[in-house]
Amino acid sequence: MTIPVPTVPAVRAALYTALVAACTPDTDVDLLVRYDEPGPYQPEDIVSVGDVTTRTTEPLAMVGGMGALALNEAYSVEVVIDVCRSGDDPGQVTTERAWALEAQVETVVRTDPTFGGNTWIARPGQSRSESEWTEDHGWFRVRITVSVDVEAAI
């Protein structure tokens, strides 16, 4: 009997690949799409496929087509959007750009909610935003964390 592995690596890879293809750069501003936190290169727009939170499993079937001891797997993948702008009044522009990228993340998930057949369903979950001025008030930053909620059979 072969025990299926968690879908987390395949879902994160599919999400990353789809975001690279779907996220559009802003005019004259670099966009970085990556796994986890960025390294030394940190442009004004960053979209990161981040941590998996609260992965749970529960029995799905003891017998049947899914195989003995099949499990339902549920977890969330955090996608972090980080946008910074400078200028005289960057708050509105920064906020609008961050939420435009958030909408692109949601569109990716809603376009293929099975991530190429790796899940039963994925959907955008909670989103939360934080905004702040940098210490010297030279940059305004908006950071949005989007939860992509996933359910799969393993």
Image: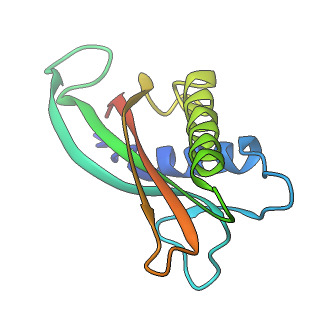
Residue 71 position in % (x across, y down): 22, 30
Q: 35 or 137, which lies in front?
A: 137
**Residue 13 in picture, x, y percent from top left:** 56, 52
Q: Quadrant of residue 51?
A: bottom left
User: Residue at left 20%, top 26%?
Assistant: 68
Residue ID at (42%, 22%): 120
Q: Is residue 86 above or below residue 50?
A: below
Q: Nearer the viewer, residue 126 or 20?
A: 126
Q: Residue at x 17, y 36 (%)?
A: 57
Check the picture and name the quadrant holding the C terminus: top left
Q: Residue 97, relative to residue 65: is it above or below?
A: below
Tell me residue 113's x, y (percent): 52, 24
Q: Quadrant of the N terminus?
A: top left
**Residue 55 horizontal side relative to residue 43, left or right:** left
Q: In the rendered image of this protein, does residue 58 appear above or below residue 56?
A: above
Image coordinates of residue 30 in percent, x first then y, are: 77, 64
